Image (cartoon, rainbow, N blue to C red):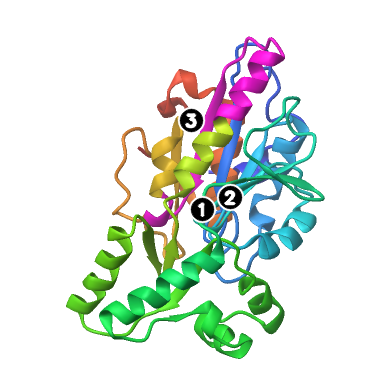
Amino acid sequence: MVRMEQALRADTVTEGVAGPRMPQYVVFADLDGTLLNTGLASWEAASLALEALRAHNIPLILVSSRTRAELEPLRRRLQHRDPFIVENGAAVFVPHGVFTFPLERVRTKPSYDVIELGMPYHMLRDVLKQIEDAVETPLHGFGDLSIEQIMEVTGLSHADAELAGMREYDEPFLFEGPQPLMEEVCRQIVMRGLRWTKVGRLFHLTGDNDKGEAAELLMRCYQREQRLRFQTRSAVSVGIGDSIQDVPLLAMVDHPILVQKPDGSFDMDVLLPRLVRTRGIGPAGWNDAVLRLLQHSFSNGMGSMGLAG
């Protein structure tokens, strides 16, 4: 089978389907292991699909556990102009001019309107110390670590570790101890109305927010924009991820898509209605999914796209 990126060109991929019947897609993309290669931060395998989205004015929303400081250099390299979601859904950054109506309950920054859904970082730091006292066990957050220690924990370069340490809404922390004690730490988090996730060695303490809720809020903005512009096409959400951490996002969108992990497997813990498993690892799978999206309207059924169900 000839690979799609060899067979298709971005200027022809949507020929004949970008008319009134095609929905206004909004694509939400996880980064690490999905749009970016695991450990390499490379998106070359997705270049054709990225070009096609830009050519047809389809919004691409970056969704990540990373900080704004980490995403901004990446956005410059990607020439990304659309909104993005940071720190596990804690805030939505909307570049000025994306929407024609004023957004509600926002903080205005030089380049963005910011919709904050999470808890401020300094408050999370206070809560982590309260839990540390309650369980009588050290919980080392990023705010307690030096740049060199963050490098050791994450494998990041010095420059990237500095950016990762610029938290605004999410406190990664290290925990070492028996399973019952870990369960008590998690219980202490939940009883305070907060949430936690775990990625690799790191736990993340967050406010009462997740990627799916942030994406849903942003999707309502796009739907409102469609109505204000008297557009007859419906706004339809597509989410692409690779792991259980992406389930809140994938569960929210109209069309959830899962890409393969580096070993070629799928995360078998991701079980959702309408979930599509695409062919290809990370950005190659992302590329495949997006190009098929543009070739065939999802309303005709996923089977017509040739994706694995």
State the residue position of label 3.
Answer: 305
Residue 56: image location, x then y, percent: 74, 29
149 or 7, which is in the foreground? 149
Label 3 – label 2 distance at C-alpha: 33 Å
Label 1: element kind = loop
Specify few, some or many for label 2: CA neighbours under 10 Å numbering under 14, 14-19, or 20 or more: many
In front: label 3 or label 2:
2
Residue 277 in view, yes or no: no
Q: Which residues are magenta?
A: 220-246
**Location of residue 57 by image quarter:** top right
Who comes first in sequence, dot 3 or dot 2? Answer: 2
State the residue position of label 2.
Answer: 91
State the residue position of label 1.
Answer: 118
Q: Are marks 2 and 1 in contact (CB under 8 Å)?
A: yes
Q: Residue at x 37, y 57 (%)?
A: 194
Label 2: element kind = strand
Label 1 – label 3 distance at C-alpha: 37 Å
Who comes first in sequence, dot 2 or dot 1? Answer: 2
On-image quarter of the C terminus: top left
**Location of residue 205 by image quarter:** bottom left
Residue 201: image location, x then y, percent: 40, 77
